[in-house]
Structures are given as structure tokens and as C-alpha cells.
Image (cartoon, coloured by chain):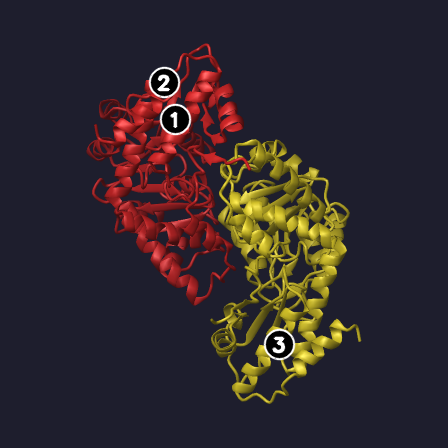
Chain colours: A yellow, B red
Amino acid sequence: MKKMHLMAPGPTPVPEAARLVMARQLIHHRGPQFKEIMAETRAGLKWLFETESEVLSLTCSGTGAFEAGITNFTSRGEKLIAVGGGKFGERWGKVGRAFGMNVVDVELEWGKALTPERLGAVLDEHDDATMVTLTASETSTGVFHPVEELGRTVREKSNALFAVDGITAVGVHKMAMDKWEIDVLVAGSQKAFGIPPGLGFLAASDRAWERAASSDHPKFYFDLQRELKRQKENQTAFTPAISVVLALREVLAMMKDEGRQGLLERHRLNAEATRAGVKALGLTLLSEQPARSVTAALVPSAFSARDIVARMRENQGVVIAGGQADLATSLIRIGHIGFFDSSDIVVVLGALEQVLGDLGMDVEMGSGVAAAQEVFSGR
Amino acid sequence: MKKMHLMAPGPTPVPEAARLVMARQLIHHRGPQFKEIMAETRAGLKWLFETESEVLSLTCSGTGAFEAGITNFTSRGEKLIAVGGGKFGERWGKVGRAFGMNVVDVELEWGKALTPERLGAVLDEHDDATMVTLTASETSTGVFHPVEELGRTVREKSNALFAVDGITAVGVHKMAMDKWEIDVLVAGSQKAFGIPPGLGFLAASDRAWERAASSDHPKFYFDLQRELKRQKENQTAFTPAISVVLALREVLAMMKDEGRQGLLERHRLNAEATRAGVKALGLTLLSEQPARSVTAALVPSAFSARDIVARMRENQGVVIAGGQADLATSLIRIGHIGFFDSSDIVVVLGALEQVLGDLGMDVEMGSGVAAAQEVFSGR
């Protein structure tokens, strides 16, 4: 009878409507019914991405989709500027290297956001770069980078494509692909969409598609030109994760009901309330430029983040995440991306109060919850 | 109130136990519960593949998994012998070309199986090939190739790895990976497993893994050495299609209950009964070496396969497939891979009798069904 509350930064809880549609019998992906569904999800994704470009649904994780975003719009030996500062940002440099690119890593202290000035200096030094990769919301640190300003810097300083990993940013922060002239934007099904992992979403600008024709990285499964052609016909090049597509249609309808502004505002409020709560409990935010997807908080050195995460799960039934790499024992990460409301924030903060108290930290019960409630009340 | 019966060669109907588990709330893929599930699915897949090697679960379609099977165990410029004879067999030659390999296409008339003699002659001419790809059960034509004998030929004649696309063969035909010395064997979740698409499965022999270290094809998402390490720890390198993994555990348990022999025998009987039925209705089998996954039957030239498929769907609620490429108007394909029993075969044949009759073909109602029943009765 133990209740579990999934509050990790993805996968996140799936709304009932999306779960139930996955319990229905499968449909064939080459029939008319699936084409109608694809027509709907294509339109919904374009709306969410704020783009007129096609948003491709790819059967893979977010990493697979972003890899495709690199390998379809660049060529071997070209220069890739990879903005680091976290596990995911740094990953795109590794992908570039794996594909024989000349990678310039922009190293950043984990927890810090990149400034346009710093990026400008890198671009001045490397004006032959053909792509800049940026993880908008860095899930390993809870940092949100100033995407719009960084994009403007890329455009002003170079001819490079601006490729944004929006895996935990699309549907959370404003990501106006066309207006901000983002060239490649990627999202993942198990994040703001709140459906199971299995689909990555990728949109590319006309500038990017123009370069795709001359790209010489080898690819077949991730050949996006083939996908583009097929998806415009409401089909996919290869068998898609049908059940996740069915779930996607459900949540896109829910997102449209809420409205894009409502969706982003709900994420803003949940994030702000969570930050207020953990600060009231005496924890320190890792980042001064926090993302709305995850709250990353450093625990006092007398305590272990691993213990806190384990007790949250075992004693409170609340699944949060620890830190990654060097932050494994010092950082806890509370996910609030997707289908969460103020009650979920109260649950996670209440559980955290109890666990910290049990571990002997000087915590006033209810103080974290109260701080969050103040935010929700708009006080 | 229209009932739909999915009898295409994949995706195929999902058993209730697997559908319901996908309606449950998601679990986190980095927690202890998921590790337990992965331990079970790893063991179940090894059992089904008849191998001691690790069977990797990859979040992609079968095409993605087979691409990984080529790119991880060969290198650029090496010679790949790709056995054609259908849409899927021919695809692996295209993958090899996309990755800069020297591809030798073994062209085969669609509907014919490859003989060991023919393959032996190709290997004599190309004794420097490093991989032979074969689609065991060619879903576009309904042909089953003599995998065991062809594998023996590869081993006797060359040092090439024998890579078998078992996407519609594993769990259908005997595929004794270790005993038959198959080097790479691939399957897909939406086929014999009867769960939604989203996972490809891949096992490789020790010989293949030895070559992986020196493979120079660029890869990151499909880097199987990273996956191998992680999956041995009951984890995946990147976020997996969690809901499909949960469904996989359910169907592997059902398969084990039925027993491997029972599973294969059920497919054999369903296929034999379907073939007897369509022949009794005056259709011609495309292949004399038929696969157990799909029955591919040519329709008399006065009729269009497209009409038959459309009427089956619209009037009878039975979803079958037409032919691919040149066979689009002349071939119908009835899928019986996965969770089907004799009643399903009666349904599809009964519906086919009605449609053919409606179209003016001289068909005796009940004759196809009766022929199938004879097979099921063992007469």
C-alpha cells in the first residue's frame, strides 16, 4: 500500500489520459488512423516549439535526437563549439568528437550560466565554427542559460548554426524557435510532455536544412532528410514508438487547453515555490540562474545527498535525484517538470523536512512548505 | 462499436497484461525497481535468443538496432555481403553504403530463399568480406531463409561475421544463436513479443565483440560497448523506453510459461493453417520457403491487392498489409507473429472469404476456414 511520488527530473508522472490510451490495443502505423494522429501531433509540436518548421518525432532518447541534430547539419572536421557546465552540455562535445569534429569546449563551472560576453569572445577566436551547442536547461545543475541573448550573439558574431538542447526547456521556459532564430531545437517525451521516454523531437531552421544536403557524417536511422519527407506525409521512415505517439496526442491536447502561457507560468511558479522551500530549510541553491525544470540544492557538508535521496524514497515514497559526477554526495535534485501542481510541491517539501529532521538537521517542520505556500499565494 | 482486428506483420496485438502495465504510473529508470526489472528482462531475452551473450535493449526501431549491429562490428571500407531478396534484406546493404562500406549485394528474386551453394560461391569470390547480413524472415515477401545452413557456410568459407536480422524470426522460428554461431542477432519489440514498437534487441558473439574495439565507424547513441557495460549493471546508457521495458517483462513471463517450444510450435501451426486457408481460396503463395511470421499471397491479376486490403479494413475491421515496392498491387500479407491463436486465423480467413466473394472472385464460403481447421485438428 506504499504510495510512490515520482519527482525526479524525468521521467515524470504521466497524466491518466495518456496512460489509459497506452492501455488500448495498438493501431497500425501505416494506416489512415495513425496518419490522422501524426497530423495532430505535428501541429501540436509546431505550436509548442513556436515554429513554422517541421518538428520531427524520432524513436530514441533525447541524446539520440540531439546527436541527429549535430550529425545532420554539420560535416566531419568542422568546428563545433560545445557549451559545457554540466553533464548534458558536455555530452554534445563528446558527440562531436565521436563524429570526427573539431570540438571547442566552452568550460564552465557547474552551476554557472554562460554570459553572452564569454560566448562572444569564444566566437571571436573561433569564427570558423559551424555549430554552437547549448543545453538550455542543464538538468545536472539546475542552470538555465540566457538562450535568447546567446542566440543573438551567435547570429551577430558568426555563421554558425545555433543548436539548442531544449530537452528540459521546451514547454517549461519560453523557447521561441523562429523568433529567436534557433537553428536546431530538441525536446524529449519524458520531460515537459509527461509521457514515457521513447520519443525525441527535433526541429531545424531553413538555414540548417540547407546545410543538411552537404553534410558528410554517415547516418541511416538518423537521416533526417528522409524523416522530413516522410513526416510531411504523416508517416515515419521507420516503425515509430506508436504507444508514445498516442500518449503524445493526449498531452498536447492538455497543453493546448492550458495554453502555452499557462504551461510556462505553472512551471515558473512550481520552481519558484520549490526554491523558496529548500532555502527556508537551510539548503543552498547551486545556481543563481535557476531552471524551472529542476531545483538543484547543495546539502550541508555534514550530510550526504545519497542518504537524503535514499530516505526520501524509502521512508517517504518520494523519488528525487542526487547529484551527478563530482556532485554525487553534495547535491539533491527535485524535478518539477511536467504534470505537477502546488500539492506536489507541498508533498516533496514536507517529505524533505521530515528526512532532514530525521537525519538530525535543525529544521523547523512546516517551514519549507510555508515558504512555498507564500509563493503560490503570490505574497 | 466497430471491432478492429490487427493482423499486419507488426505491430501486432498487445496482450492485456502488457497493456495494463503501461497504464500504471511510470517508474524512474535510475532506481532499484528498474534494475530488478532489467535483470529479469536480460535473463528472459538470453533465454529466448538461446545465448549466453548479453542481449542489449536499445531504444529505437529494429532498423536502428540492426544499423548498430553493422556499425559496431565492422569498419569503413570493409566488405559487407548483404543478402537481398526483399525490402529488409536490401536495406542492410544501404546501411553499409551509408557508412562507407564496400557492399556486395546478393540479389535474389523477391520470394526466393538463398541457398547455401549460392552464398558459398559469393563467399569464394569475396573471401575478404568481414560481415554477411541476412534477414532471416523477410517480412516483405514471407520468405524464411535457411539460417542454420547459411551460417555454417559463412563459418566454413570465411572469417566474416554472420549478422542475422531476426526481427520477425526470433520467437517465431528456432534461432539458436550460440549453437548456430550467429555473431549478431537482432529482434524488435513489436513482433513476436507483441508489445509496442520502441525497443530493438541485439546480441553479439564474443568474436563480434572482439572486433568492436577496432571498429572505426563514428557512433555515440549506438555505441554498443558503452551499452554493454551499463546493461550488465542493469542500467542503460541513455534513458530507455521505460513503458515498453515494463511490457517486455510481462510478455517474457508469458513466453516462458508457454515454453520456447510451445511458442515456436504455435507460430508454425498458425502459419501453416493460414497458408492452407489462402491456398484453398485460390490464392498463390509467393514463397516456397515460407516464414512463420507472415503469409504473403499473390492475388489473381483481375483483382487489386489494394482493394482487398482496403475492404478487409473497412468492411471487416481486419487490418492486413499489402505488398511493398513492385508487389504493391499484387500481394497481400497476413501477419500472424505474436499473440495469435487459431480463432484469429479463422477470423482473418473468414473475412478474406467475404471480401474476395464481394469482389466477384469464385470463392466457396467457409472453404478457407475449413482448410485451416484441418491443420489445427492435425488431420
Q: Using a 10 Å C-alpha cutoff, classify the residue at mark 1 as few (fewer than 14 neighbours), some (14 to 19) or many (20 or more).
A: many
In the image, taking residue A166 as reference, residue B210 lies left or right, namely: left
Q: Using a 10 Å C-alpha cutoff, classify the residue at mark 2 as few (fewer than 14 neighbours), some (14 to 19) or many (20 or more).
A: many
- Residue B184 vs B228, above or below: the answer is above
Q: Secondary structure at mark 3?
A: helix
- Residue A376 vs B347, above or below: the answer is below
* Residue placed most toward the observer, A5 or B145: A5
Does any portion of residue A209 appear in the rendered image? yes
In the image, taking residue B146 as reference, residue B199 lies left or right, namely: right
Residue A216, percent from left and from top: 54, 36
Q: Using a 10 Å C-alpha cutoff, classify the residue at mark 3 as few (fewer than 14 neighbours), some (14 to 19) or many (20 or more).
A: many
* C-alpha separation, residue under disc 3 versus residue under disc 2: 68 Å
Q: Which residue is mark 1?
A: B349
Same chain assignment for discs 3 and 2? no
Residue A349's mark?
3
Q: Secondary structure at mark 2?
A: loop
* C-alpha separation, residue under disc 3 versus residue under disc 1: 60 Å
Residue A186, percent from left and from top: 62, 49
Residue B139's mark?
none
Q: Secondary structure at mark 1?
A: helix
Q: Choose mark 3 or mark 1, whichever is in front.
A: 1
Q: Amino acid at mark 3?
A: Leu
Residue positioned most to the right: A379
* Residue placed most toward the observer, A219 or B102: A219
| Residue A71 lies in quadrant | top right
Residue B246, percent from left and from top: 43, 55
Quadrant the C terminus of chain A occupies:
bottom right
Q: Which residue is mark 2?
A: B281
Q: Amino acid at mark 2?
A: Leu
- Residue B243 vs A274, above or below: the answer is above
Q: Are marks 2 and 1 in contact (CB under 8 Å)?
A: yes
